[in-house]
Image (cartoon, rainbow, N blue to C red):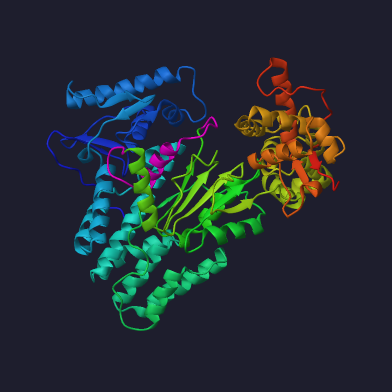
């Protein structure tokens, strides 16, 4: 897949390269790009050419462990050095790096950056293929692939997590273009040209179905039918052994064609894939959730496409489940799988247009420049209607932010994760995650601290899990903390978590904090709902409550109490029964840790007189709050 880099060759022109080590040349002469932190800034700006890059993003790239007090000033120094570099190239009549929208934007033309040239050639190749000009398509796609260097993109800066993510996206896009090129060559009867590199790529990406199908087609077209059938059989066994899945209907159809003798020049799999793979790494400590995972795989892997909402309290494992499923569904979505967070780093909701811009960039949708929102949405919907891709929209705040992003037609699937129910989204499947049973929570704890240590004091381990309310995030943080504090007895840590005044202080591991995750959910609630939740959180001493006691606590009548509780169910702060049951017989629960946080925050708001202050007498707090609406 790698070839010798080719530059534009225009005299006096600067040429930047990301498809290999970060580099810049002018008239064949390399330009010095400065020290590592300055190169990180330049690489980040070049990875988003002609687009404002927020200062916070640049700061996180340069100082991932936390910025110094002088970070903003240092960043200005790196940007000034870049300006000076370009000033020496362009003269004084062109400002390459401009301050724009709270960040910096690097102006660069297509002929000056290999990734822009790669994208243009790939898009032109796909367009030629869609209109049936396969020879032109193969030539243009080959030109795009020839831009790649002998070494991976940005390999000299991959110790930066954000740069590594960008490099992986580039590699995924290159892989998709290689598939496009191979299929175009096969359809023009030049299977032998494509055959050489396919075997190596399949070995490196064994679950990539388009690659394997192209390899099968190449072997079959060159008269090596037995080898082509063996490739399918190996793939079928791999899927069954590793994932418990069968090959897709398209792959099975290709196999049947080959069994019927004769040759076929047309690949059965789609040729116009565009976005590759852009997923976070799956957690190595993912445990349990077998039934839930099976349902998510079944719904989101539907050949006709689907929209699935995975909801549940903060920290219950929604994102981990969605990402796990997306990794396992590689064979079902030949046009790519992408993950987009629906919130900013501070927990505030991203706008729909902001997410649409990111989706367009990841999936190579639309042309240069930023179209108006309506045009961008129509272009995105057109792309969805013509492709088979899986989109994960993670931590969605509300329905408004994702309307227009969900497919109206076609075979794409979208998985949304959200604390609330997103009840306003119709025609969606739903999977509500509850906290796991004690056994699954103990299994998660064991993966982090080791089975041997857990067996030293099983009762204390169970106390830890129950003090966490079996919430996966809290159990994971406990495990991470205990993995560092090897000297700390499990029983002593369980005692700390049992103390309601200290539990949230103990549930911190590095930059991972249960309190901060709960705080995000608390801020999402209205002042009225925060008041209701705080009062219910104070009713947890004896574990169960009648409707009459809840009515007394909230100072409302029966109907008002039920409505208040159901509003919290819709927001994800209260879990509801899994089966059908009348309100008078229902059991609702507020997780223990949310109870602790609600009481803590309500007390702080009461002291400061902030909105949402809870009036009335303070009530004792037990290990959790569960509301039983009596049978009457």
Where residue 112 sits in the image (x, y, percent)? 22, 38
Using the image as rendered, state which of residue 148 and residue 550 is in the foreground.
Answer: 550
Q: Is residue 50 above or below residue 152?
A: above
**Residue 164: quadrant of the picture:** top left
Residue at the farthest left position: 11
Q: Quadrant of the N terminus?
A: bottom left
- Left or right, 629 with respect to 256, comes to right
Q: How many marks?
A: 0
Question: Where is residue 561, by image quadrant?
Answer: top right
* Horizontal relation, residue 8 to residue 181: left or right: left
Residue interval drawn in magenta: 345-371
Image height of 300 relative to 102, above or below: below
- At a point 37% along the width and 48% down the height, the residue shown is 380
Residue in view at x 84 percent, y 28 percent: 620
Residue 63 picture location, percent across and down: 47, 28
Q: Is residue 346 highlighted in magenta?
A: yes
Residue 63 painted magenta = no
Residue 318 in sight here: yes
Residue 315 visible: no
Q: Nearer the viewer, residue 430 or 505?
A: 430
Picture coordinates of residue 337, whole percent (x, y): 45, 52
Picture coordinates of residue 181 (x, y %)? 28, 60
Looking at this view, name the residue that lies furthest to the top.
608
Seen in the picture, residue 265 relative to 51 is either above or below; the reply is below
């Amino acid at each position: 897949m790698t070839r010798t880099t080719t530059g534009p060759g225009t005299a006096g022109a600067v040429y930047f390269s990301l498809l290999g080590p970060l580099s810049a040349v002018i008239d064949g002469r390399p330009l010095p790009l400065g020290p590592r932190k300055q190169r990180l800034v330049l690489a980040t700006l070049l990875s988003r050419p002609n687009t404002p890059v927020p200062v916070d993003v640049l700061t996180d790239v340069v100082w991932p462990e936390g910025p110094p007090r002088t970070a903003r000033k240092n960043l200005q120094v790196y940007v000034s050095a870049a300006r000076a570099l370009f000033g020496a190239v362009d003269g004084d009549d062109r400002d390459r790096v401009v301050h724009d929208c709270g960040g910096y934007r690097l102006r660069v033309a297509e002929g000056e950056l290999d990734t822009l040239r790669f994208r243009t050639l790939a898009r032109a190749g796909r367009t030629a293929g869609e209109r049936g000009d396969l020879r032109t398509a193969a030539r243009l796609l080959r030109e795009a692939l020839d831009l790649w260097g002998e070494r991976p993109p940005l390999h000299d800066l991959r110790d930066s997590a954000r740069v590594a993510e960008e490099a992986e996206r580039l590699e995924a896009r290159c892989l998709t273009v290689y598939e496009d090129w191979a299929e175009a060559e096969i359809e023009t009867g030049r299977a032998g040209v494509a055959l050489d590199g396919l075997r190596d790529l399949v070995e490196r990406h064994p679950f990539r179905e388009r690659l394997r199908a192209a390899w099968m087609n190449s072997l079959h077209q060159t008269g090596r039918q037995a080898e082509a059938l063996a490739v399918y059989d190996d793939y079928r066994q791999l899927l069954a052994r590793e994932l418990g899945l069968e090959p897709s209907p398209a792959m099975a159809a290709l196999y049947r064609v080959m069994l019927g003798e004769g040759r076929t020049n047309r690949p059965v799999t789609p040729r116009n894939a565009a976005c590759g793979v852009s997923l976070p790494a799956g957690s190595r400590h993912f445990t349990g959730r077998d039934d839930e995972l099976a349902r998510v795989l079944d719904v989101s892997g539907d050949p006709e496409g689907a929209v699935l909402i995975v909801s549940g309290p903060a920290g219950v494992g929604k994102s981990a489940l969605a990402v796990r499923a997306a990794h396992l569904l590689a064979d079902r979505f030949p046009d790519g799988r992408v993950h987009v967070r629906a919130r900013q780093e501070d927990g505030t909701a991203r706008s729909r247009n902001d997410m649409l811009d990111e989706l367009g960039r990841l999936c190579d949708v639309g042309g240069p420049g930023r179209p108006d929102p309506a045009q961008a949405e129509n272009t995105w919907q057109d792309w969805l209607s013509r492709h088979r891709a899986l989109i994960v929209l993670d931590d969605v705040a509300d329905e408004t932010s994702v309307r227009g992003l969900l497919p109206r037609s076609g075979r794409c699937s979208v998985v949304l994760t959200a604390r609330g129910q997103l009840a306003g989204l119709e025609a969606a499947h739903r999977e509500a995650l509850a906290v796991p049973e004690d056994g699954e929570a103990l299994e998660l704890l064991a993966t982090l601290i080791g089975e041997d240590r857990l067996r030293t004091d099983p009762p204390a381990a169970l106390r830890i899990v129950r003090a966490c309310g079996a919430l996966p995030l809290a159990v994971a943080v406990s495990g991470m903390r205990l993995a560092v504090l090897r000297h700390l007895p499990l029983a002593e840590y369980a005692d700390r978590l049992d103390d309601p005044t200290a539990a949230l202080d103990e549930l911190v591991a590095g930059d991972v904090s249960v309190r901060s995750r709960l705080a995000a959910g608390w801020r999402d609630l209205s002042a009225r709902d925060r008041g209701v939740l705080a009062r219910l959180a104070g009713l947890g001493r004896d574990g169960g409550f009648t409707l009459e006691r809840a009515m007394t606590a909230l100072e409302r009548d029966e109907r008002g109490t039920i409505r208040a509780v159901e509003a919290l169910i819709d927001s994800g702060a209260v879990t509801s029964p899994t089966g059908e049951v009348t309100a008078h017989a229902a059991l609702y629960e507020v997780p223990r840790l949310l109870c602790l946080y609600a009481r803590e925050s309500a007390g702080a708001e009461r002291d400061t007189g902030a909105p949402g202050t809870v009036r009335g007498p303070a009530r004792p707090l037990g290990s959790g709050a569960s509301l039983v609406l009596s049978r009457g």
